[in-house]
Amino acid sequence: DKGAYPYYMLKEIDEQPAVMRKIVQKYFDENGQPKIDEDLLKSMAAADHLYIVGAGTSYHAGLIGARIFEKLVGVPTSVHISSEFAYEQPLLSKKPFFIFLSQSGETADSREVLVHVNENKWPSLTITNVDKSTLSREATFTELLYAGPEIAVASTKAYTAQIAVEAVLAKALGEYMDKPAAREFDVKHQLGLVANGMQSLTDSKGIMKDLSDKYLSKTRNAFYIGRGIDWSVSLEAALKLKEISYVQAEGFASGELKHGTIALIEKGTPVIGIITQDRTAGLTRSNLEETQARGSNALTIVSRHLAQDGDNILLPDVDELLTPLLSVVPAQLLAYYTSLGKGLDVDKPRNLAKSVTVQ
Ligand code: F6R
């Protein structure tokens, strides 16, 4: 039931702070220690490489998760689009461990990979919102998202829940393997900060509505740009805009623009820079300026401690590994208001189904 909300998507965006708190409640014991099945940790610790597999938004959540696993656990982690992996399998390591990300647990492309994983008797974990779903039943282990039903076709709270659960899992695995980076990373505290930060962003919807009216409602195309983890979020931000507002949007590595794609920038093209990482903030800003010099309407989504005069959307500060949980929220809202402003059916965009059970 969407209650007073005009669309499920807006309700689900607003539920994200509560989902973060629920994940903390479900995944930590009273001493603040992560609660993850020891058999799962043992199986993961024995692997020499983690393979994350997913489609669409879940693939994008995997891109963030891989960075978190590599930082906290120090194990090489790669991320694959399930429809590619199923038919063009990369050369695998000797002891692979597979993590399936799927809100629905029913995506046929992902299942196709799992069938192959099981044929080879490789261990696997499904992280899903739906208990007893196909991917959950068929994987060796399951962890749940606890995000509550996601009804809108465009995935929002499942993306942030997937990232949060990946972070908890990386923390637990890293500690199990005695990795200092994991010991020092207080995920529980950080997820509390994230929940509060999400709340302040969802409380400032007016900013996103105004920016969407002014810069996105009439454009045919748009760019999200960033580096590293901000680039990964750019892909998800662009997907949200594409699928519900039909703006042709591209998420792009900001430093790569000058190698060709900057040719697409015209007067008025919206280019939204995501800037949350100390090491790359200056570089992304200068890439954004390069587009501005070609006439773009440059907008920014920036962590508060990196903010400068003229920035558009400020994000409360959290650990650099978890900034995607905040930077995606304005992008979800920009997509929502752009779709709403065009009078489109936000929850049921054309040509799309909530669960994709064909290959
Ligand atoms: C985008 C979206 C899709 C799904 C994808 C995978 O908003 O919802 O891209 O993320 O179809 O679905 P799941 O996570 O159910 O496997």
Image (cartoon, rainbow, N blue to C red):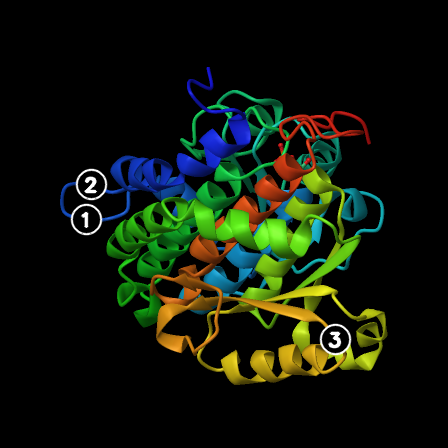
Residue drawn at (49%, 43%), measured in percent from left and top?
162
Rendering coords of residue 35 (x, y %): 29, 42
Dividing the picture into quadrants, the one containing residue 24 is top left
Label 2 with label 1: CB-CB less than 8 Å: yes
Disc 3 or disc 2, which is closer to the eye? 3
Image-quarter location of ligand 1? top right
Rendering coords of residue 47 (x, y %): 53, 56
Label placed on residue 316: none
Q: Secondary structure at mark 2?
A: loop
Dividing the picture into quadrants, the one containing residue 105 is top right
The disc labelled 2 sits on which kind of residue? Asp
Label 3 with label 2: CB-CB less than 8 Å: no
Label 2: which residue?
Answer: 29
Residue drawn at (28%, 55%), measured in percent from left and top?
193
Label 1: which residue?
Answer: 32
Label 3: which residue?
Answer: 295
The disc labelled 3 sits on which kind of residue? Gly
**Quarter containing the C terminus:** top right
Hey, which residue is sitting farthest left in the picture?
Answer: 31
Report how far apart the C-alphas of labels 1 and 3 lie in the structure. Answer: 50 Å
Q: Nearer the viewer, residue 185 or 289?
A: 289
